Image: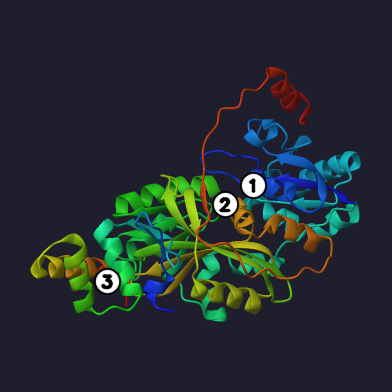
Amino acid sequence: MSKLSSLAISDNGFIFKPSTGESYTTNEIGLFIINLLRTENSGEEIIEAIMDDFDVDKITAGRDMYEFLDVMKRESLID
Amino acid sequence: MKKKLTIGVTGLNNIDSPGPGVPVIRGIKDADFEARIIGLAYENLEPGIYMKGLVDKTYLLPFPSAGSEAFLERLSFIQENEKMDIIIPNFDSELYLFIKYKDRLLEMGIKTFLPTMNQFEERHKDNLTEFAKKYDITIPESKAILKTDELSNLPKPFAYPYWIKGKFYEAYKVENRNQAIYYFNKISAKWGLPIVIQKAIQGTELNVIALGDGEGNTTAAVAMRKQYITDKGKAWGGITLNDPHLLEITHHIIKQTKWRGAMELEMIKSKDGEYHLIEINPRIPAWVYLAVGAGQNIPEMLCKLALGEKIEPITEYEIGKMFIRYSWDLIGDIKDFEKIIVFGEL
C-alpha cells in the first residue's frame, strides 16, 4: 500500500496518518491536489486542473503544487 | 445467564500518574460476565475508593515493603470475607509478591494470570541488555549503576543527554553531571537501586499493550502513540495506530518469551525507522481502556485466561481511536474517609 493510499483524509481537509498517529490539516487547494494525486493524475494534469478550478496562471499553479508536494514528502505522507 | 465473579483489583490511584485499576475495572464492567469488584488500595485517598459505581468494597493492603507475612495475612482476611475468584495486581512494586505467592493465593481460591518469576525478572530495566541479546531485540545502550561515582566513568555511547531511570518508576532526561547526580539520589531514595542509565534515542515514542497466553501466543495487542505527555511523562491523550512492524516485534517477544499475562512495550521509533525497545512493563498499563474502546477488552480476556478458559486471539482493532484523560473533583464524605482510616475498609 502506498503512503498516500494509507492516509485517512476527510472532506474538511483533515489528514490522519494511521502508521504514526499524526494528524494534519490542509486548505482547499491542498485537498484538491491530494484528491488528484489519489486518482493518479500526472503533475501536468494537476497543474492544469488547478489553473481551471482556481483561476490562476501556470506559474502560480505549479508553485502551489510543488510547494505542497514538498511539504507532503517532508512529512512522509507520499513516497 | 451471566456468571458472577468476584475480582480484586489494585491500582486505584487515578491521579496525575495514574494506576491502571480504574480503567481495568471499566473493562471488566464492559465484559460478558458480571463481577463484584473488590478494590485493594494502599493509600486512604486513592480516588478509585470513592468513585461511585466502581468498586463494591475496598480494603487497604499493607505496602509491599511491609513484607510477605503482612501481605498474605491481609489477603487471607479479605478472602475469608469476599471469596475472590481473581486478583489483578496493577503495580510494578507489588508484582513480585503476587508472583512469588501465586500458589498460596491459589490455595486460598484466588487465581491470577501473571508472568512467571523468570519472565518478570529477566525483563527488568537493569537486565534489558541481556534480555535484548537473548531475544534479538534492538534497545538503546543501557547500563545499571549502583553509585554516583559511576556517572563519571560512563562508556562512550552515554553522551548527554541520556535517561536516568528508577528500578520501578520515574525517568528523567539529564543534560549534565550535576543533573545526573541529583536524579540518581532522588530516584534511588524512592525506588532503591540499581539506577539505569539509558542512551536517549531521538524519535517518536510508541507503546503497545498486549496479552500473552503463556504458550507463545499473542491473544491481544494494540499499538498507541501518546499525543499529549505530562511533565511526569504520562500520556494524557493517545491514539491507536496501524503499525504492523511494531505488532510484529510484540508477537516476536511474546512468542520467544512465552509471555504469560499482560504487558506494555515502550518503544522509540527513530527518524530512520528503527524500533528500539526502551522498557517492558509486566502488567496492564493505565491506558488500557483505549484498547477496550478500540475493540480488545484485555481485562476481560485476562480474567478468562486466569479462569483457565480458552480464548480466541483478537487481531483486529479500530485505528484512530483516541483517549483523552481528564481530572474531576469528587465530593466525598468524611464518614467514608473515617471508615477507610479506622477500619481499613469501605
Instruction: Write down the quadrant of residue B95 in the picture.
Output: bottom right
Q: Is residue B251 above or below residue B235?
A: below
Q: Is residue B171 left or right of residue B55?
A: left
Badge 2 or badge 1: first in the primary sequence: 1
Which SS class for mark 2? Answer: loop
Does mark 3 fall on the same chain as mark 1? no
Q: Is residue A39 above or below residue B207?
A: below
Q: Nearer the viewer, mark 2 or mark 3?
A: 3
Q: CA distance from mark 2 to mark 1?
A: 7 Å
Using the image as rendered, state which of residue B178 and residue B174 is in the foreground.
Answer: B174
Residue found 70% across the figure and 55% down from its top = B299
Instruction: Determine the chain carrying the residue at label 3.
Output: A
Where does label 3 land, which residue? A73
Residue B265 visible: yes
Instruction: Determine the chain carrying the residue at label 2.
Output: B
Q: CA distance from mark 2 to mark 3?
A: 32 Å
Residue found 41% across the figure and 69% down from its top = B269
Amino acid at dot 1: Pro
Q: Is residue B89 left or right of residue A23?
A: right
Using the image as rendered, state which of residue A69 and residue B80 is in the foreground.
Answer: A69
Which SS class for mark 1? Answer: helix
Question: Local crowd at mark 1 within 10 Å, few (<14), some, or many (≥20)?
Answer: many
Where does label 1 land, which residue? B23
Where does label 2 land, which residue? B287
Question: Local crowd at mark 2 within 10 Å, few (<14), some, or many (≥20)?
Answer: many
Using the image as rendered, state which of residue B77 and residue A22 is in the foreground.
Answer: A22
